[in-house]
Image (spheres, rainbow, N blue to C red):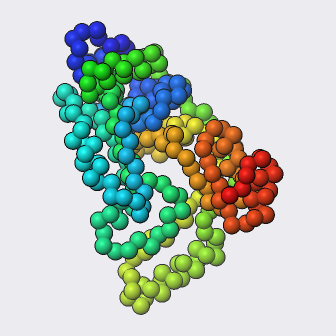
Amino acid sequence: MSLPTSPTTSLDGLGPGPSPEAVALALSRSGAPDIAWLDSSLEEGARWSVVAAWPDRTLTSHRGGPDPFPRLRELVRETPAPAAPLPAAHLILAAGYDLGARFDRFPTRAFDDLQEPDLRLRRYPAILIYDHRRQAWWFSALSADARREGAGRYFRILPENVPPPPPPGAPAPGPLRRNLGRDAYLAAVREAKRLITEGEIYQVNLAQRFQVPTTEDPLQVYRRLRRLSPAPYAAFIAASGEPALERGCGDGDPLLQLRASGLDVEGLDSSSDMLETKSSNSGYLPK
């Protein structure tokens, strides 16, 4: 798969090539930043998938931060309409459930323990679009400069037109953690039943989070997940380059493993003894 040399346009038909999964895997292995894969490969009759990397604009918003929508509207106005008779997704938005708090008048009581953005928008000057019906690729760029630069980035690392290797087997799991113990969860169920009986609420969704520490490549986790539990339309959106914060980091597991793998992770804990243990394990100053 190669880029035509003429004419210079912002949309090029590339013909057959490797699968979107193979392209996303090649980008990941090359270290391309902020990979996005809009994945409709597993839906019969679905037509388009998009793979992209190297955004030139990023907008993130956290709960309680400034209103992101003026900047979002500005970014949309700044982005030229692609010359594409197909869905050229140069703006890719990941919106969290808590973004609804920007519109609701009701107070938000949920504790934001993960500190994840409730909105993350990226603009990709050049993207690859796969037509599943014709089994052919398109290359879309927002300008001649984006076309030239994007071609130099994408086409030097794209794989051959062969099926990608299957994802590796899951590594041995680390210790399973959950944010609610059995007694606390059962107490919450009893409280929910009481409030329903008294007419205060009519429904409640009780949930808890299970976590397993890992340093595995997130794309490989997604590749396994899409085989075990396929979704008609899914997406993998990497969030590289953004620091992470682990609350309740304890003695440094898995924080130290994540830092050793090159991730920018800080840790907080209310126990000074735990922080001293983490510090002695790593030479990392406690916070």
* Residue 31 image point, x, y percent: 53, 28
Relative to 141, say whether 3 is above or below.
above
Q: Quadrant of residue 118?
A: bottom left
Q: Residue at x 30, y 16 (%)?
A: 15
Q: Position of residue 97 (x, y in %)?
A: 38, 59
Kindly tell me whether residue 178 is visible in this rendering: yes
Compare residues 68 and 188 and report the one nearer the observer: 68
Which residue is found at the position 44% from the left and 34% from the top? Answer: 35
Does residue 67 appear to the left or right of 187 in the view shown?
Answer: left
Q: Residue furthest top?
A: 5
- Quadrant where the image shows the N terminus: top left
Percent x, y of residue 258 = 65, 44
Q: Residue at x 24, y 42 (%)?
A: 76
Q: Percent from the top left, x then y, of residue 7?
A: 21, 11
Q: Residue at left 66%, top 43%?
A: 259
Residue 228: in sight, yes or no? no
Quadrant in which the C terminus is drawn = bottom right
204 displayed left or right of 67? right
As rendered, which of 64 and 45 lies closer to the eye?
A: 64
Give left or right: position of 241 versus 279: left
Q: Quadrant of residue 63?
A: bottom left
In the foreground, 284 or 6: 284
